[in-house]
Image (cartoon, rainbow, N blue to C red):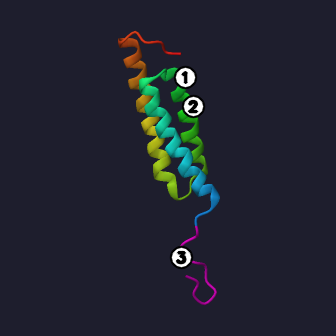
Amino acid sequence: MLVFGLLPERVPAGATDTLAGFLAAAGIFVSLTGLAYRPLRLIPLALVLSLLAVAIGGRHARLATAAVFIGATCFAVGMALAVITSNPLW
């Protein structure tokens, strides 16, 4: 709401904010998929998507930060599971 020519209290969401949200959600999805299928192939891609979402920032900054931590956890757990179960890493 604009009062007496001052700046608005909330800035409307732009396309970059929406893109950051989608990148963070895609990073989480790909990270969780990497747990079940080839962690060394998928999870680094998910981390790149999540880091791009963090770099964009905006109103989805907490989701993007969570996506990075989820990706790092999935990488450690996925690699351990692949080694323990003798599944291929690639």
Tell me what residue is drawn at x 57 percent, y 87 percent: 3
Q: Amino acid at mark 2?
A: Leu
Point out residue 9 in the picture as x, y percentages from the top left corner.
53, 76
Furthest residue toward top = 86
* 24 sits to left or right of 15: left
Task: Give the residue displayed 36% in from the left and 12% down from the top.
Answer: 85
Q: Which mark is residue 45?
A: 2
Q: Is residue 51 above or below residue 37?
A: below
Residue 50 place in picture, x, y as percent? 54, 41
The residue at the point 51 percent across, 29 percent down is 43
Q: Is-magenta flag for residue 5?
A: yes
Q: Nearer the viewer, residue 52 or 32?
A: 32
Instruction: Check disc 3 and report its element: helix, strand or loop.
Output: loop
Badge 3: residue crowd in 10 Å (few <14, some 14–19, many ≥20): few
Q: Which element carries disc 1, helix, strand or loop?
A: helix
Q: Nearer the viewer, mark 3 or mark 1?
A: 1
Query: Which residues lie in the magenta part?
Result: 1-12
**Three-letter residue code for mark 3:** Glu
Disc 2 from disc 3: Cα separation: 37 Å
Query: Nearer the observer, disc 2 or disc 3?
Result: 2
Disc 1 and disc 2: Cα gap in Å?
A: 7 Å
Of 59 and 22, the residue lying toward us: 22
Q: Are circles 1 and 2 on residues that touch, CB within 8 Å? A: yes
The residue that disc 1 covers is 41
Q: Main secondary structure of the magenta part?
A: loop
The numbered disc on residue 9 is 3
Task: Say which amino acid is labelled 1.
Answer: Arg
Residue 30 in magenta?
no
